[in-house]
Amino acid sequence: MKLNSSGGGPFNILRLRAIIVTIAVSLVPFTSLAKTIVLDGSLKSRIKVSQQMGFSVERPLNKLSFRFALPQSFSNKFVFQKVDNLNIRFTPEPSELKDETDGFGNRFRVVTWNGLRSPVSVKIDFEVELSSELRAESSTTSFPLKDIPDKEKVFLKPTKMVQSDSQDIIKISRQLTSSAITEYEAVSSILNYVIDHVRYTYNPPQYDALWTLKTGTGNCQNFAHLSMALLRAAGIPARIVGGITLKESWKVPVDENSYLVQSMGQGGHAWIEIYFPDLGWLSYDPQQSKQFTSSRHIKQTHGLDSDDINDSWRASPYLPEYNELIEAKFISDSINLKPAGVSDRAPKAYLLSNRFIAKKVIPEIKPEIEAPSLPEGKTFEFGNMEFPTLVELYQVIGDKGVRILDKETAEYVTSRYVYAQAFTIPETIELEMISLAMRKFGGDGTVYIDLVMDERGRPGMRGIRSSPLFIENIPRRPGYYWVDFAFPEKVKLDKGRYWIVLRHSGDVIMNWFYIPGNPYGDADDTRSTLKGYRWEDIQNFDFVFKVKAKRL
């Protein structure tokens, strides 16, 4: 495994003062734990939230009716949420306003404007107290479930988004739960399968469970719908949750030298709740956690599928464009967690859990992650090839606009931390260019990347540096777009694992777009460091990149 640059040869990063001072370093190899990290402790936060939604009125509207969810207090075995100081303001004042509560207990406000000739703004301000207690728990519920209360049986019904009556869904559900003797075992097997089977993508054309199963892709709504379909097919009540996640990251200790950084992006999000007869409804985020959700998850609604929980609007003679901005200020934030010393063997992506007693290990069913196959021909590309230049906020269904439960996910990567993304190649290639999905916000200076070889699971000290890009030469555009990094010499990459390390000079302000859930490679392929060489933090996402190369 070596990296060659015709002409100048490889450089040693330790000699570059721009990276770190000369120092003798003994890198401690990361001890890979099983992928479900079991924790003890708590998360407690109090937050001021401002959610501003609006519509662009380009020409007169005869009528606009907007139905949106209101945040509310709730609690279950491990999660507590209390909402107060709720204040809602409208510009202009609506012609009609009413509150309604649906059959699931969700609270909505329905607002109507007549004769609109100016943009509409709806601002919701509230404070929320959130806490998650990660303590040891056990369940005595056997599998298959018996004696489910009538009021919970509704969450066994199939819907057009959750096709739990499909033979394809039923077959996989039975296969996954065939060895389960407890509900917890059945739930864990199903969720491990979904996490490993589905790769996160933005702007999927469909959100239903069958489409998700067949394509193996989707966003948070797809994860939720497929999970619920498999659970309901197994006779386990499950419901979707709609709400907001906040971008404030938090760290989970993995061992003495490493932390797993949790970051979800700020905006609409969907997760699920699963019913245990002896414990009640428990919170699960298929992209992050089991039996609980973090103090960055604010629940608004729950239902049979996303049609029950999404904000929606109707208008005539046309549907106006929708926009949304969420801001959050943490009044207090306490993260007190420690590894419990016990972990499951699945899934491949990192998942967080409290200590939960299970009597038996369920065989894992998951696809293998393979290195990209390199096509014949002169030039090819690989990486996150399905990256959208913009993430859509809503979709139009017939005469109705419906908010999409997804959010912008990006990291401020020209801050005090340094970030790196790994990829693996199965054979020798000649590198032409590396592109990153980024957005310029301002400042001055340059950005460039170091492409370095892997050393014991982390970025190493040998590699090649790209040509610098001056910030003034990078266009400013709405959304995120490919920024291309070229190299001064031809670069030959032998078979192996490499890291893209983003560097900068001056006061550059740029974000690097990411996709939750490590969909490209494995759970350890995105890291950050504060010291310059330790790479102590593992991210729960993949940065969006693509590589252009020639096959040798």
Image (spheres, rainbow, N blue to C red):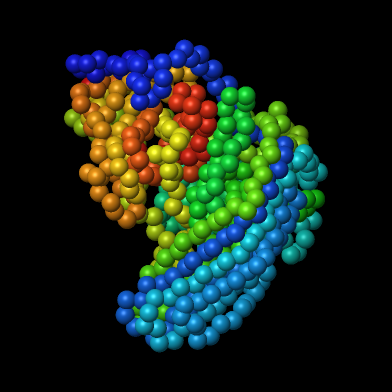
Residue drawn at 43 percent across, 57 percent down = 206
Q: Position of residue 362 (x, y in %)?
A: 66, 34
* Corner quadrant of residue 512: top left
Residue drawn at 55 percent across, 78 percent down = 110
Q: Judge by depth and name the residue closer to the eye, 251 or 432.
A: 251
Q: Judge by depth and name the residue closer to the eye, 279 or 510.
A: 510
Residue drawn at 48 percent across, 44 percent down = 516
- Can the viewer see residue 482? yes
Task: Decide if residue 357 is on the left or right side of residue 43.
Answer: right
* Corner quadrant of residue 81: bottom right
Pick the quarter of the image with the N terminus: top left
Task: Decide if residue 390 is on the left or right side of residue 86.
Answer: left
Q: Position of residue 465 (x, y in %)?
A: 29, 25
- Can the viewer see residue 547? no
Q: Judge by depth and name the residue closer to the eye, 423 or 221.
A: 423
The mark tally for this picture is 0
Residue drawn at 44 percent across, 86 percent down = 114
Q: Position of residue 115 (x, y in %)?
A: 40, 87
Is the residue 360 above or below the residue 167 in the image?
above
Task: Decide if residue 224 is on the left or right side of residue 461.
Answer: right
Q: Judge by depth and name the residue closer to the eye, 413 or 270.
A: 413
Is the residue 200 above or below the residue 492 in the image?
below
Task: Decide if residue 209 is on the left or right side of residue 549.
Answer: right
Pick the quarter of the image with the C terminus: top left
